[in-house]
Image (tube, coloured by chain):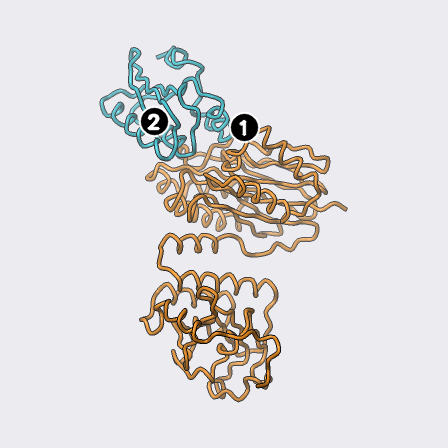
């Protein structure tokens, strides 16, 4: 037999048993998968997206959009090739690829571009999350990561119907995925939840030329806090794209007044916008109190204000304050879950200064801080967002 | 460990003394104690936190909603004798602006 190269030997019997054990084959359509493929289609701006399972002699789609059939012979499917390796398969132009250009399923379809990420059941590759398009195309690193993240989501969906687990994956999907590419600026963040889901959130995006970051903490824990958190995040994100962060906070409190009042909930939040070229920015602190700039000498200064948490009283307003992130400065925002590990606030600040002194990248700082929290096992949600202005 | 709420009165004021951690699990106990005080027409409340070493965000939520509840009916809610952690979270969240802590229960009720 030819083609040994690096393709690992697949135990087909065990693979089919793992596929069977999912108990998904030939089940009716489900909204959770249908919505997911629609989302994938939108995210990748393609006409075709599908969750396919590779059965003994056929390819079967649990969900698909833009495909005329839900089933085809296995030997005619590109996905069959995808699951041979534990990595995404990207074919820029199927017509120009000798492996696929004679597939009856593709002839006359006009489809050229294919990208598929294998889906696992346990250790076995049982299916593929794939997208297809009419135009020749490659995927960049960020798109490959996105495909992988979405495939992780599909795998979790395939493996379980546990609603909380579904909520957890969705909440992770709501975290900022975009990598901020600004000269001289690094941004990174992470959120550990004490339960499947939690009330912490963070966000970042560029609007009107400024980097915007947000971190917040909804009172309470678990699914209730998570639902409110996703609302607050959405309203803040929507507002801050078009109006100042000061107005965005007041607007968010106004929009959510009834929701927060009815549930007797409040939200602490910090938001900042930063001009990436000058390092000048404005922040709003709504009772969050845990945003710190550590300068290149390791000296911390807290970005505080007298602002109350959102929802603490009705009709409240917030004031933005100016700040400067100089070269070499690091802005760190954490949630109060982090404080549980320290006796006092100044102990926490001291630990942070020492860490920032090591000249780590924003991502390394986030990794260090979350590893610290993980070692102690968070009892509350712990969120970290770091913005670093590189020196020179 | 369950938190206990002991109710007593000083003149017009009702003192709710919390014994134990005021957290997501125990906050409902305080909420319902506040509720029954307000329902029975007593809207000047002092929450005595001398016996509470720890308050989480849900505990703060119970205090804030108690404050709203009492103010709606023309009363008020004040905090007495908070320990260090409680002072810290009140300070961090700026909630001490609306939930100003008093050193003692007597201080809290002095002008009622």
Question: Residue A331, relative to residue A163: is it above or below?
Answer: above
Q: Tell me: A218 left or right of A89.
A: left
Give the image location of residue A298, x and y in percent. Answer: 70, 35
Give the side of residue A159 with respect to residue A95, left or right: left
Viewer-side residue, A307 vs B18: B18
* Chain in orange in the render: A
**From where the camera sits, is residue A231 visible?**
no
Dot 2 and dot 1 residues touching (CB under 8 Å): no
Chain of the residue under the numbered disc 2 shown in the image: B
Q: Which chain is cyan?
A: B
From the top left corner, tell me how far across and down residue A226 is, in percent: 41, 46
Q: Nearer the viewer, residue A355 or B45?
A: A355
Element type at mark 1? loop
Q: Which mark is residue A222?
A: none
Residue A60, horizontal then vertical, whole percent: 40, 76
Give the image location of residue B10, x and y in percent. 31, 11
Q: Which residue is mark 1?
A: A343
- Residue under the point 70% across and 38% down: A357
- The disc at residue B3 is 2
Which residue is painted at 44% across and 27% down in the image?
Answer: B54
Q: Quadrant of residue B34?
A: top left
Residue B101 lies in quadrant: top left
Residue A1 higher or lower than B24, as above or below: below
């Amino acid at each position: 037999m030819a083609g040994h190269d690096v393709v690992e030997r697949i135990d087909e019997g065990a693979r089919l048993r793992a596929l069977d054990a999912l108990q998904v084959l030939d089940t009716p359509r489900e909204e959770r998968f249908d919505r997911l493929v629609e989302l994938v289609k939108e995210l990748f701006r393609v006409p075709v997206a599908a969750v396919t399972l590779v059965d003994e002699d056929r390819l079967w789609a649990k969900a698909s959009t833009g495909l005329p059939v839900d089933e085809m012979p296995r030997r005619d499917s590109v996905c069959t090739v995808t699951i041979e390796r534990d990595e995404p398969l990207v074919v820029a132009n199927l017509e120009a690829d000798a492996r696929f250009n004679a597939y009856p399923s593709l002839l006359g379809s006009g489809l050229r571009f294919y990208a598929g990420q294998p889906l696992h059941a346990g250790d076995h590759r049982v299916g593929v999350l794939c997208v297809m398009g009419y135009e020749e195309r490659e995927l960049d690193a960020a798109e490959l990561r996105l495909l992988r993240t979405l495939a992780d989501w599909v795998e979790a969906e395939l493996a379980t119907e546990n609603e909380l687990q579904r909520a957890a994956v969705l909440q992770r999907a709501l975290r900022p995925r975009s990598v901020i590419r600004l000269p001289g600026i690094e941004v990174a963040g992470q959120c550990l939840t004490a339960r499947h889901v939690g009330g912490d959130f963070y966000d970042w995006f560029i609007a009107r030329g400024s980097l915007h970051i947000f971190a917040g903490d909804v009172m309470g824990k678990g699914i209730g806090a998570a639902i409110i958190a996703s609302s607050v995040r959405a309203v803040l994100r929507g507002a801050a794209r078009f109006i100042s962060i000061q107005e965005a906070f007041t607007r968010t409190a106004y929009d959510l007044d009834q929701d927060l009042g009815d549930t007797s909930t409040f939200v602490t939040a910090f938001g900042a916008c930063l001009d990436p070229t000058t390092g000048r920015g404005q922040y709003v602190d709504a009772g969050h109190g845990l945003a710190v700039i550590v300068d290149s000498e390791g000296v911390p200064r807290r970005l505080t204000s007298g602002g109350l948490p959102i929802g603490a009283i009705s009709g409240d307003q917030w004031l933005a304050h100016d700040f400067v992130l100089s070269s070499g400065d690091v802005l760190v925002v954490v949630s109060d879950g982090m404080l549980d590990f320290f006796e006092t606030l100044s102990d926490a600040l001291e630990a942070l200064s020492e860490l920032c002194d090591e000249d780590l990248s924003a991502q390394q700082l986030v990794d260090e801080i979350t590893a610290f929290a993980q070692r102690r096992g968070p009892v509350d949600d712990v969120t970290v967002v770091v913005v670093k202005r590189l020196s020179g | 460990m369950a938190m206990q709420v002991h109710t007593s009165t000083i003149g017009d004021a009702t003192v709710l003394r919390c014994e134990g951690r005021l957290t997501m699990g125990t906050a409902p106990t305080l909420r319902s104690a506040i509720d029954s005080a307000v329902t029975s027409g007593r809207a000047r409340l002092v929450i005595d936190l001398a016996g509470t070493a720890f308050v989480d965000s849900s505990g703060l939520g119970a205090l804030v909603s108690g404050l709203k509840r009492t103010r709606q009916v023309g009363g008020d809610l004040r905090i007495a004798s908070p320990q260090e952690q409680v002072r810290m979270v009140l300070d961090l969240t700026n909630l001490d602006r609306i939930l100003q802590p008093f050193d003692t229960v007597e201080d809290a009720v002095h002008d009622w």
